[in-house]
Image (cartoon, rainbow, N blue to C red):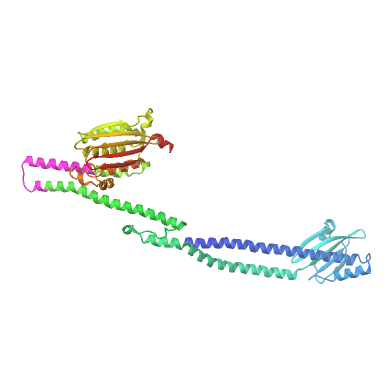
Amino acid sequence: MKIKTKLTLQFSAIFMGLLLAFSVSVYYFSSQFRANDYYGRILNRAYATAHYVLDADTVSEQQHALDRRLYYQMLPREEVKVYDSNLDLIFRDGEYKAAIGKDVVQKVLAEGEVRQMVGDRQLIGVRYFHRGKPYAVLASSVDVYNLNKLQHLSTLLIMGLFGSLLVVLVCGLIFSRAALSPFLKVVSEVERINASDLHRRLSQDKGTDEVAQLAQTFNNLLDRLEKAFESQRTFVYSASHELRTPLTAIIGELEVALMKKRPSEEYERVLHSILDDAKLLAQLSNGLLQMVQASTDTSKVPMHSIRMDELVWQASAEARKRQPHMVLDVQFADMPEDENELLIKGNEALLLIAMVNVLENAAKFSTKEPIISATIEVSEQKLVCRVRDKGIGMSPEDVRKVFVPFFRAENVREISGHGIGLPLAEKIIKLHRGTIALNSQLNQGTEVVISLPKLIAVYKL
């Protein structure tokens, strides 16, 4: 069932429920008022009958004449009866005969007053004392006029109820359509967006209502999707380009070697060249796999407590295997007394990859002065590691693109690399809720600042 139909039915049901309750209340209270009012009129008729029948011998002629005039002001379909204490009928008047049993007369004599309905006839009985003896005076009548009015009222209420139902259904349909029209517009705009035109945005994002919030949220989602698709296209293109280079070199070497028979030394040279290209290809593939691993959800990555200084020393040992000329100077800006202040929570393997990549880059681009400094700073909430080199540096334009996968600055084209190290390090650091920043100047060196939350701060979050 569509929301528009649900809203219409719910709106109609609520309105009709209220209208039904109102109509029933009006009819009920009108009926009660009519009945009580008519009981009062019948009660007056009962006392008028008692005065006229029983008090005739005890009042003056003038009072009796007045009682007679009051008595003859009869009600519609009226019947009056007077019983003595022996339950004998001593007076009766009226064209209509109501079936009244002796038990009712006894009840009147016992209780003093009785009111009840006999079909559509209202009956009232009162106990009246004359000369010290009790008498039961019963009067009954049918409120023809007011019952007709009540019947007419019920007809009007029922007709009004069904007429209102029709009006409410139409109005509810119009109301729901008007209320949902912004959502329907959003749906129609969303249906026109596909993977080839993620640049399109919803037009309902201006305002403060729920539709605008929904459109804003969806537009933000489209922004993220567009960036993800663009990054994916760039990644696939760059990865394909980087993987094609060593593969092309391998194929070329093999084709040249197979063109004619060559000496064993030549074949050995070709195999060594292919081995170097294969190692380069394996290194590149490992880097791509590590980038995918670094993008994994944090909940799926095992985390343990790690000492920041030990991580730096371990990364230095690994980086020195790749860059033997590297010299690392590790310093503490503020050495804490408590060793727990040096603990961070993370995945040791991933953080080691990130730190090794940063140190290896620093050594790789510091060909003249391979001395690298790593300073560990301890603050209240985080640990900061600053890695500085005095290498060739980068221009401001290149610094802004340094975390883009496979990007390489113009002045490092001659140095081997794939442009994966720093983007991989950034993904790993962000996975650990940290930050990484790079400051560099041409021919003066580069500083990489890695900030990670302390283990104590993580537990406080």
**Residue 454 in magenta stretch:** no
- Residue bounds of the magenta highlight: 255-284
Task: State left or right for residue 317 relative to residue 87.
Answer: left
Relative to 165, 352 lies left or right: left
Could you tell me what secondary structure mostly forms the magenta stretch? helix
Nearest the eye: 97 or 405: 405
Is residue 368 among what the camera can see?
A: yes
Q: Position of residue 38 (x, y in %)?
A: 77, 65
Residue 155 image offset from top left, x and y in percent: 65, 69
Apparent side of residue 85 relative to residue 155 in the rendered image (left or right)? right
Residue at 38 percent of width and 30 percent of height: 340
Q: Position of residue 326 (x, y in %)?
A: 22, 34
Give whichever of 130, 171 is nearer the camera: 171
Location of residue 30 (image quadrant)? bottom right
Give the quadrant of residue 321. Answer: top left
| Between 68 and 241, the one nearer to me in the picture | 241
Residue at 24% across, 44% down: 394
User: How many numbered marks have been drawn onto this rendered protein structure?
Assistant: 0
143 vs 104: above or below: below
Q: Is residue 38 left or right of residue 344?
A: right
Q: Quadrant of residue 211?
A: bottom left
**Residue 366 screen position, x and y as percent:** 21, 38
In the depicted structure, whether residue 290 falls above or below residue 137 = above
Q: What residue is at 34 percent from the left and 38 percent from the top?
A: 451
**Near-viewer residue (323 or 188):** 323
Q: Is residue 1 visible?
A: no
Q: Where's the C terminus, which quadrant?
A: top left
